[in-house]
Image: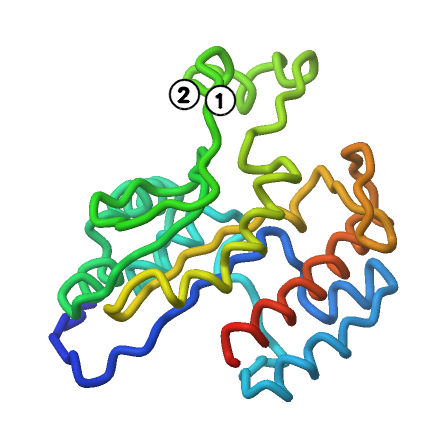
Amino acid sequence: KNIEIVENKTLTPDIYFILLDAYAGEKVLKKYYNFDNSNFINSLRDRGFFVHNESYSNYANTIPSLGSTFNMEYFDNDTERQRIYSMLPESTTVKLLDLNGYKMIDFQKHSIAFDIPVIDKTLCKKDSNRYTDTRLLDQLLKYTPLSTLITIVPPEQDMDTQLCLFAELPNTQDMFDEPTFVFAHSLVTHSPYYYGPNGEPVTPIVDDEHYVYSIKFANKNMLKIIDELLD
């Protein structure tokens, strides 16, 4: 479909796109994890958010989902989804924001994040490891039995980086005089999980119990961040 990109600088609020990766919906959490997330959902509604009762992810994976969202359209096959994801720097959303004078902020990039030339500031950067941070190794771990022998936690998924994202998000509203678009992709709720029942650090683990702990930890931090941004 054709989407007209127009300039309208009279209505340019700050925009926060916060993606909690692998965060399940309320019904899934209740049915499969025996966790009632209604307190968090109602807290969002109390703060003026609209939360759809029957929402579903448009795709099962992050890459096509982001490609579809930023281009404001759906795609029918995997090849097209991958192609459109690679075009994110020229996506409808990025063009629209750039045309209307937005400054763009993101956080530590990783293998499924996109490199946008017009990004003005990247927060929570960490030094990459030249031996492990390579496209070849990434593909080998994804598509060969090597993944059963080697476990590498990417730097953006470690605890320090995720805590940095939570800490820095509220500060983004004061970084530029211009309207701001903030893209914050958090992997706190994506395996492996780093948090115990009270948010204390644990050895990275993958099980249902610690997934719920991570959901609770994310909920607590998100409400704190939202309150600071709305204050």
Give the CA distance from mark 2 to mark 1.
Answer: 5 Å
User: Where 188 sits versus 6, above or below?
Assistant: above
Q: Which mark is residue 38?
A: none
Q: Amino acid at mark 1?
A: Asp
Mark 2 touching mark 1, by CB under 8 A? Answer: yes
What residue is rendered at 22% in x and 61% in y? Answer: 92
Q: Is residue 147 left or right of residue 129?
A: right
SS label for mark 1 = helix
Q: Residues within 10 Å of mark 1 (few under 14, many from 20)?
A: some
Q: Is residue 191 left or right of residue 113?
A: right
User: Where 138 sits versus 131, above or below?
Assistant: below
Where residue 105 appears, as percent x and y from the top left, is: 35, 54
What residue is rendered at 42% in x and 67% in y? Answer: 16
Q: Quadrant of residue 56?
A: bottom right
SS label for mark 2 = helix
The foreground one among 64 and 220 is 220
Q: Amino acid at mark 2?
A: Arg
Residue carrying label 2: 135
What residue is rendered at 65% in x and 45% in y? Answer: 190
Q: Quadrant of residue 110?
A: top left
The foreground one among 182 and 170 is 170
What is the tally of numbered marks visible in this picture?
Answer: 2
Q: Residues within 10 Å of mark 2 (few under 14, many from 20)?
A: few
Where residue 226 appears, as percent x and y from the top left, is: 56, 73
Q: Is residue 79 left or right of residue 156?
A: left
What residue is rendered at 26% in x and 45% in y? Answer: 116
User: Where 139 sits versus 190, above or below?
Assistant: above
Residue carrying label 1: 138
